[in-house]
């Protein structure tokens, strides 16, 4: 099957045909393993489990025994396609129309994985298989799901066997409008919180005989959002707090509810840790004098790989192919880079994110080819030819 290993479009078609909706492997890792094994990679299929979560199949593949170990990371799992009738063509029957490849996972991020494989195949062929270091692939089936049995556990498995990464490129879609606009050198942290205020139910005509929790919850939320949490930092915008729900569950117009609750999400920069931010929020809430309870969960801490050798290699490769100098950004949501950053410098660069998770998701064919050229340039610059 290595006949198509250098062609990112053929590889993309093969991957999109696999219905790998989280947590189903769908044949995507089988396809990748066969291609990579044919190129000489030593492949490991790693299935991890945890209570209350589905088992997840992952793939780690490496060629070379020496350092440095340059890792391509990503995920083959995709979000559900939704109503198939809304799609112009079957989301798992990839179609090329008007220069675009349509199918679930085209943007996020099967075409990027295809470009990584094609780049590796081209690089190995050009070096006749010999170079000073290693190339690896860390591919999970759990990025779009709970992210419990995927990348994080593969990294633990690597650490337990004494194997590490020296640099990592994650192929998440990073560009808003054109290939080469943006690479990600960090991500904001994400905190979710639920506030609950208890009161005393009563008749709306006799508010003095009840305890309305709604005004108290409004004051508490104002304490969260009315004063900025910070002014941003060198590489991050200011932290944002967004109210996502406000609920009392009250279908009756003349009853004061017994309880009110709200949820909010905070995307925080490198001036905060999850624990420090929670302490700051509780200090603000306590200062209102209103009673409350709050449950907090942090899905990822903020992190930054400061501009340096890895980002320069990627930026130079992008500019050589596209003519654009990418903005080194920390915008957007979270990704599995939040786990990788504890093990090696990490940067994210992939296709455009305009249609990720949407109906008729697509990737421009020219961008798929250009991305493979960029990734090839990354390998060539990271592993300079001594000749």
Image (cartoon, rainbow, N blue to C red):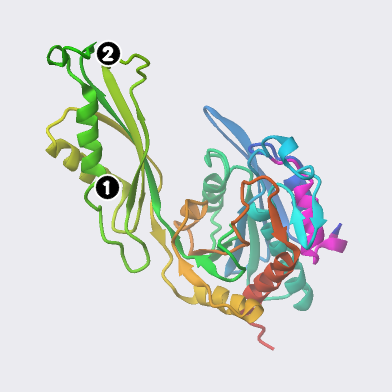
In primary-sequence order, the first of circles 1 and 2 is 2
Judged left or right of residue 200, residue 298 is right
Q: Say if the magenta span includes residue 10.
A: yes
What span is colored magenta in the figure?
2-20
Label drawn at residue 277: 1
Q: Say if the magenta span includes residue 146.
A: no
Q: What residue is drawn where x is 28% and y is 32%? A: 294
Residue toward you, 327 or 25: 327
Residue toward you, 199 or 279: 199
Q: Estimate the x, y position of residue 132 in percent, counting from the top left.
A: 64, 76
Q: What residue is drawn where x is 64% and y is 61%? A: 136
The quarter of the image holding the N terminus is: bottom right
Where residue 220 sits, quadrant-wise, is: top left
The quarter of the image holding the C terminus is: bottom right
Label drawn at residue 255: 2
Residue toward you, 303 or 266: 266
Q: Which numbered mark, 1 or 2, is in the foreground of this view? A: 2
């Amino acid at each position: 099957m290595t006949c198509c290993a250098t062609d990112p479009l053929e590889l993309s078609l093969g991957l999109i045909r696999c219905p790998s909706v989280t947590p189903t492997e769908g044949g995507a890792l089988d396809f990748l393993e066969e291609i990579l094994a044919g190129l000489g990679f030593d492949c490991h299929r790693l299935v991890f489990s945890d209570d209350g979560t589905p088992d997840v199949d992952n793939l780690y593949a490496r060629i070379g025994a020496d350092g440095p170990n340059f890792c391509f990371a990503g995920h083959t799992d995709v979000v559900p396609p939704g109503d198939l009738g809304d799609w112009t063509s079957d989301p798992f029957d990839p179609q090329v129309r008007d220069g675009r490849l349509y199918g679930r996972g085209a943007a996020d991020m099967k075409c990027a994985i295809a470009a990584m494989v094609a780049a590796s195949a081209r690089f190995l062929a050009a070096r006749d298989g010999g170079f000073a270091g290693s190339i690896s692939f860390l591919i999970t089936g759990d990025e779009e799901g709970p992210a419990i049995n995927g990348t994080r556990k593969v990294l633990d498995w690597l650490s337990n066997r004494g194997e590490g990464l020296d640099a990592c490129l994650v192929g998440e879609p990073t560009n808003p409008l054109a290939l080469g606009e943006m690479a990600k050198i960090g991500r904001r942290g994400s905190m979710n919180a639920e506030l609950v205020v208890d009161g005393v139910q009563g008749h709306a005509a006799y508010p003095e005989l009840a305890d309305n929790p709604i005004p108290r919850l409004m004051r508490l939320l104002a304490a969260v959002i009315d004063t900025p949490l910070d002014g941003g930092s060198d590489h991050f915008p200011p932290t944002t707090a967004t109210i996502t729900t406000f609920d009392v569950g009250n279908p009756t117009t003349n009853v004061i509810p017994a309880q009110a609750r709200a949820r909010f999400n905070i995307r925080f920069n490198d001036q905060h840790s999850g624990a420090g931010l929670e302490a700051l929020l509780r200090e603000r809430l306590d200062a209102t004098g209103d009673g409350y309870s709050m449950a907090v969960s942090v899905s990822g801490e903020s992190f930054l790989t400061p501009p340096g050798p890895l980002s320069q290699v990627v930026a130079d490769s992008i500019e050589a192919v596209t003519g654009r100098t990418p903005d080194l950004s920390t915008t957007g949501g979270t990704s599995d880079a939040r786990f990788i950053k504890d093990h090696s410098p990490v940067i994210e660069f992939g296709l455009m994110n305009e249609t990720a998770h949407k109906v008729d998701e697509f990737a421009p064919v020219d961008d798929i080819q250009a991305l493979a050229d960029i990734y090839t340039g990354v390998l060539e610059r990271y592993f300079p030819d001594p000749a």
